[in-house]
Image (cartoon, grey):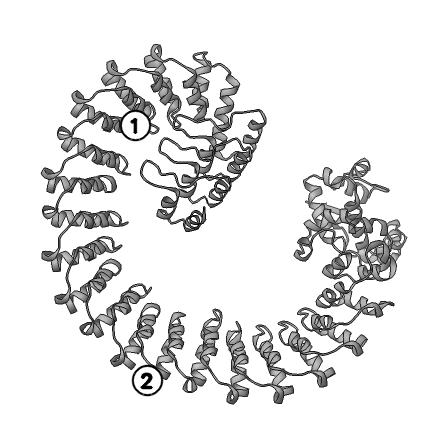
């Protein structure tokens, strides 16, 4: 170790590289190095060195009487270095962590601490604490506010030598005068520091208050030792109050030991109150032992009140305490409704406590409706079964009770209730609704229909509920038992169409009651909104397609939400009644299976379509090459290739190159390459480079690069397009400016905060609109980059309410994608969430639709 070093730089000057070669050269006859580990060559070498006296003569042992103190001094010296924070490397950072956690562990005595007191002071002052406390693994230290009192440090690290330093060596240089605030924490901690306080020559300055005695009684780790020390050293000052006895009774680890000590040493002062017994009953780890001790030693003073029994019932380890109370003092216990409530609220052991009480004292209980409802609400099948078995005959059967059991319990509980008290039960619509919402609802409803179906009042609401929420078997049983009383209304059909088991339920209804069913547009809508709706729609088209009233809205819905097969079936069944409008084609274009659906419509009905500019624009901008090819084949003569069509093709993000190539090949004479077309290609975020290269290759003479084209490429992040313009056309003025804008947009899109910061420092324009009227803030918000959004908002130079061509502001997509923190940031920056987009949606509506209910609450609270 370097001598006299005050910094890491000083150590570097004297550093010795310790490797296997150095060790073997200097100690080769004693030590061998195998891999990374040194080994003594002779097993008896250590014994020889000790016997020979060589170690005692070694200089290192003259300086360090105990090898561990070398580590202590090394750690403290390291923490004392002036340049420790600035100079540390990865390896040094590891040692800093070691030093922060172990510098005090290697010191055993006051004498060892005295040898390095100056550096010790520097470690314990505010500056020194700032270096090591935050790296210490002890949470009690880590979360303290610096500067931390050195008394607090001594108590937390539990080092008697540090307490000795404070009390006898340099109290005025290291800390303020000892105050009462350190006595209580010391009494709560391990014995070491507290023992030093009581053994200190000036220990009369330590006041033994009720709080100190309470802290000792409640000390879960060392309560017995601390209390014994208190009684031995300062017994005359120790007052045993009710609060002290309570603290001992609720001490989860040392409670029995402390209570025994108090009873043995100061029994005359220990008063066993209801609060003390209650505290013992609530004690999760030592409750049984403490209660047994109280009953054995002071049983005559232990009164078992309702509050005590409630405390035991609510104890997470309550079964053992309750069993002890029942065994020792069962005659004094009254099992009230409040006791059962406490047990029901005990989520860890409440079931066992309730079972125990019912088993041992069920005959004595007053069974109220509230108690039954409460037990049913806990979904504890075994408890309910035992309650019904023990006291079913005494229960007053109410609708609420039956509803709760139907909704929360399994089939067996309902079966037992029917068996015990079936004559007193009325199976109402509410009961059936509750059963439908039960995890075991199918079995419960089947049981109720089987046993009591003949007595039920069959309402439309009940049938709707079963059609919409239950599986096929429940509906089959209802039809079998009460089919004659059922009316299959449109609401029933809608419910069945929306059921996750909709195909099976609908097939059953068609088979059993098909003649009564009318397949309306609303029924088809319900099926379309169902995850398994495709199968329901296919079934309805297959079985009843000929009877449907075919409206434009129905065709739009099928085109937009179903796969090719459903549209094929509709065309087959009712093609003559269908009109393929522009709205139908729009819907198909937005379908996940849009290509196949549109190809089918063009193939089967292309000749009947009215070909509008808007339809051609939509296909050019949203569809793949094959759809446009089929449209050209079927209706090319009726198509006008306008600027809007070519612009849409140039901006087609998925298939721009292919669609544009097709238009140039098939209708090249009609394709005019305008500034708007080149702008659309330059701003195409997915296919821009390919489309631009195609236009330059095929129609280069017509491609004019204006500032608006360059701006479109830059504001859409199209660095490759800018590169083409710069290298191929040599037409890029202010090159650095435009590349910075493109890089800025891409950094916002990808969440690259550091790059954003660098570009802002270089003066990039941070809020430019691209052709879609999208800004860097907008694109960062949609992609959920919270830090980037925050950084952009902090510039105060961005428009939080900018709206895209679809009428959507940054907060819209943040809400739609569930980015809660971004929504909060935007609202704090005065974003307006009430903008309505081109489809009639708002941020609130879209977040509600996608189930982001925290965001819904935030937006509802906004004013």
Q: Residue at x 14, y 43 (%)?
A: 550
Side of 790 relative to 416 (left or right): right
The answer for how far apart the CA atoms under marks 2 and 1 are is 74 Å
Question: Residue 662: horizontal and vertical position, in percent?
Answer: 26, 21
Side of 425 relative to 295 (left or right): left
Q: Is mark 2 on a helix, strand or loop?
A: helix
In depth, the one of 104 and 548 nearer the eye is 548
Residues packed near mark 1 inside 10 Å, few (<14), some (14 to 19) or many (20 plus): many
Q: In this view, does 616 lie above or below 445?
A: above
| Numbered mark located on residue 393 in the image | 2
Q: Can residue 34 be seen in this snapshot?
A: no
Question: Residue 450: horizontal and vertical position, in percent?
Answer: 21, 72
Image quarter of residue 617: top left
Residue situated furthest front in the rendering = 863
In depth, the one of 501 and 237 nearer the eye is 237
Side of 462 relative to 61 (left or right): left
Say whether marks 2 and 1 touch (CB < 8 Å): no
């Amino acid at each position: 170790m370097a001598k006299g070093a005050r910094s890491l730089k000083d150590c570097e000057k004297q550093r010795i590289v310790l490797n296997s070669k150095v060790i073997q050269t200097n100690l080769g006859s004693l030590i061998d190095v195998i891999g990374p580990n040194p080994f003594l060559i002779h097993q008896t070498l250590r014994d020889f060195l000790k016997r020979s006296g060589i170690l005692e003569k070694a200089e290192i042992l003259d300086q360090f009487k105990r090898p561990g103190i070398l580590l202590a001094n090394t750690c403290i010296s390291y923490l004392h270095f002036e340049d420790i924070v600035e100079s540390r490397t990865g390896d040094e950072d590891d040692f800093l962590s070691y030093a922060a956690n172990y510098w005090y562990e290697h010191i055993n005595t006051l004498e060892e601490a005295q040898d390095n007191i100056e550096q010790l002071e520097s470690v314990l002052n505010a500056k020194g604490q700032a270096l090591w406390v935050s790296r210490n693994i002890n949470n009690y230290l880590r979360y303290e506010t610096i500067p931390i009192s050195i008394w607090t440090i001594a108590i937390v690290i539990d080092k008697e030598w540090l307490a000795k330093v404070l009390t006898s060596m340099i109290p005025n240089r290291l800390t303020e005068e000892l105050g009462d605030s350190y006595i209580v924490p010391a009494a709560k901690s391990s014995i070491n520091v507290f023992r030093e306080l009581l053994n200190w020559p000036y220990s009369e300055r330590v006041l033994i208050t009720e709080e100190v005695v309470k802290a000792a009684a409640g000390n879960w780790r060392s309560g017995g030792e601390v209390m014994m020390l208190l009684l031995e050293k300062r017994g005359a000052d120790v007052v045993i109050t009710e609060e002290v006895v309570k603290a001992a009774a609720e001490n989860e680890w040392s409670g029995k030991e402390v209570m025994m000590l108090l009873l043995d040493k100061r029994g005359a002062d220990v008063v066993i109150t209801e609060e003390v017994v209650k505290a013992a009953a609530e004690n999760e780890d030592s409750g049984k032992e403490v209660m047994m001790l109280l009953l054995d030693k002071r049983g005559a003073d232990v009164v078992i009140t309702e509050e005590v029994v409630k405390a035991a019932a609510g104890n997470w380890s309550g079964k053992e305490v309750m069993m002890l109370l029942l065994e020792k003092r069962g005659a004094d216990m009254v099992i009230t409704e409040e006791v059962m409530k406490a047990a029901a609220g005990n989520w860890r052991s409440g079931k066992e406590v309730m079972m125990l009480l019912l088993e041992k004292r069920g005959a004595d209980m007053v069974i109220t409706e509230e108690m039954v409802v409460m037990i049913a609400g806990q979904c504890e099948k075994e408890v309910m079964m035992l309650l019904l078995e023990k006291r079913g005959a005494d229960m007053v059967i109410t609708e609420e009770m039956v509803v709760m059991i139907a909704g929360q319990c399994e089939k067996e509980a309902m079966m037992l209730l029917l068996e015990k008290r079936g004559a007193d039960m009325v199976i109402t619509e509410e009961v059936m609704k509750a059963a439908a919402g039960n995890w075991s609802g199918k079995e419960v409803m089947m049981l109720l229909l089987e046993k009591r179906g003949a007595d039920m009042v069959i309402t439309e609401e009940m049938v709707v509920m079963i059609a919409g929420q239950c599986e096929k078997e429940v509906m089959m049983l209802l039809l079998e038992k009460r089919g004659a009383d059922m009316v299959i209304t449109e609401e029933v059909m809608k419910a069945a169409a929306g059921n996750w088991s909709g195909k099976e339920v609908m097939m059953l209804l068609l088979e059993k009651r098909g003649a009564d069913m009318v397949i309306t547009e609303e029924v088809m809508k319900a099926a379309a909104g169902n995850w398994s709706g495709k199968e329901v729609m296919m079934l309805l088209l297959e079985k009843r397609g000929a009877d449907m009233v075919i409206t434009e809205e129905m065709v739009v819905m099928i085109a937009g939400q179903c796969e090719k097969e459903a549209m094929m079936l509709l065309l087959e069944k009712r093609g003559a009644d269908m009109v393929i409008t522009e709205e139908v084609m729009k819907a198909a274009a937005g379908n996940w299976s849009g290509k196949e659906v549109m190809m089918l419509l063009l193939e089967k009905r292309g000749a009947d379509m009215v070909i509008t500019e808007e339809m051609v624009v939509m296909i050019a901008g949203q569809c793949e090459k094959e759809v446009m090819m089929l449209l050209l084949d079927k209706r090319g003569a009726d198509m006008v290739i306008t600027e809007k069509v070519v612009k849409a093709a140039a901006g087609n993000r998925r298939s721009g190159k292919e669609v544009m190539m097709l238009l140039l090949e098939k209708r090249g004479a009609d394709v005019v390459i305008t500034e708007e077309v080149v702008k659309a290609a330059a701003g195409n975020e997915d296919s821009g480079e390919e489309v631009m290269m195609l236009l330059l290759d095929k129609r280069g003479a017509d491609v004019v690069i204006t500032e608006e084209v360059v701006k479109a490429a830059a504001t859409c992040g199209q660095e490759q397009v800018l590169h083409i313009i710069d290298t191929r056309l040599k037409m890029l003025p202010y090159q650095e400016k435009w590349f910075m804008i493109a890089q800025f947009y891409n950094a916002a899109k990808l969440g690259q905060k550091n790059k954003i910061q660098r570009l802002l420092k270089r003066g990039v324009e941070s809020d430019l609109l691209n052709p879609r009227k999208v800004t860097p803030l907008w694109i960062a918000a949609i992609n959920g980059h919270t830090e980037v959004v925050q950084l952009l908002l902090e510039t105060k130079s961005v428009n939080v309410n900018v709206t895209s061509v679809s009428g959507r502001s940054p907060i819209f997509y943040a809400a739609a994608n569930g980015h809660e923190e971004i929504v909060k940031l935007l609202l704090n920056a005065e974003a307006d969430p009430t903008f309505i987009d081109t489809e009639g949606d708002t941020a609130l509506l879209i977040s509600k639709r996608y189930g982001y209910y925290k965001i819904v609450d935030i937006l509802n609270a906004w004013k």
